[in-house]
Image: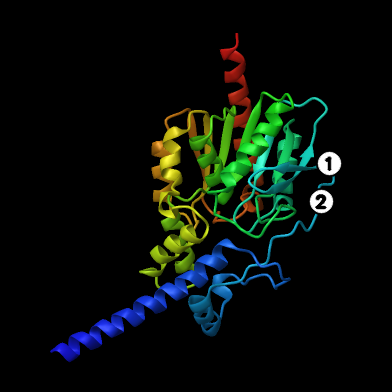
Amino acid sequence: MKKIARAFFIVFIVFFIFTNIVAIFHSYKFTHFSSEKLAKPKKPEDLTKAEKLKIMLLGIRIPKPSNDKKPHQKFKTIVLQSNKKIECWSIRNEESKGTVILFHGYGGKKSSMIDKADVFLDLGYNVFMVDFIGSGGSEGLQTTIGYKEAENVKSAYDYIKENGERNIFLFGTSMGAAAIMKALADYPLEPKGIIIECPFRTMYEATKARFKAVGAPVFPMAGLVVFWGGLTNGFWAFDHNPVEYARKIKCNTLLLYGEQDKRVSREEINAIYSNLHCSKELKTYPLAGHVNYLLKYKTEWTQDIGTFLDQTNISIFSNHQ
């Protein structure tokens, strides 16, 4: 009996050590881009069984996102000192209604927001596009899935406000949405409104979705990756939960969601929406997944955005009468 118990204990210890080593590999690669030029990672559904097994064991190396195109309008490059240096693009309208600051998602960069910036410009707004830390022209290789990026949101907001703008809107997709929500929960920012696309409810659920996408076992790996990911990046990742940040948001909020999203569930979106104690609206797109909504719903997206901005501006004007 003692031999069986001892053998069981040894197997448990080996399994515990092995799973933690695998989790450390995953967490590091999940939160650190590679400086090497690598091929663009395949979509999970395009991976072979051997490739999926390799990813399950070692994680996936993701090259640092680089800006592969530039705006066709005249723009100015601005570097701000945040928690690290972040690079931004500023495009101005001659007679603007305000400024929209745009924040990209995980693995993105500011050039991926050009098509959305064009819509805001056509609607009469200045745009200010931001590369989060570790992405595009910004400093470093680290990404914290919206946690430390919240300080980048604050830095961009402060810069725009200090330059005289009072009608400021924040737009973010996925990780960018989470970063906006955390920034509003942590700092005394007062944008006129925010537009957030498909934010995850909790860091743990976002990590579970990543494992499910490649067919990897969720338990216990997702929890271990969240633990090590936070530990190696200097924060407690289990507290990185937009569903809780939502409770502290007071400004007008437009929440957008694609009903075919396999990374963020409708239940997550409903929970976030329920916790928003402000003037709020939820718009969904039936055939969209965790992708750029302009691909299938440009007309609807533009109308939803334009209506929200106009109504918010009317409300602001009325309140100042």
Q: Which residue is mark 2?
A: 70
What label does residue 9 carry, if any?
A: none
Q: Nearer the viewer, residue 227 or 55?
A: 227
Give the answer, above or below, for where 114 lies relative to 204. above
Determine the CA span between mark 1 and mark 2. 9 Å
Going by the numbered disc 1, the residue's amino acid type is Phe
Pinpoint residue 160: horizontal percent, then vertical percent.
70, 31
Graded by Cα atoms within 10 Å as few (under 14), some (14 to 19) or many (20 or more), the crowding at tag 1 reads some
**Residue 26 drawn above or below residue 259:** below
Residue tagged by mark 1? 75
Secondary element under disc 2, as helix, strand or loop, is loop
Task: Tell me the quarter of the image containing the C terminus.
Answer: top right
Location of residue 158 by image quarter: top right
Looking at the picture, how far across and down is residue 226, in whole percent?
A: 44, 60
Q: Residues within 10 Å of mark 2 (few under 14, many from 20)?
A: few
Counting labels gives 2
Whether residue 258 is visible, yes or no, is: yes
Give the left or right position of residue 213, taking residue 107 as reference: left
Residue sitting at x 54%, y 39%: 183
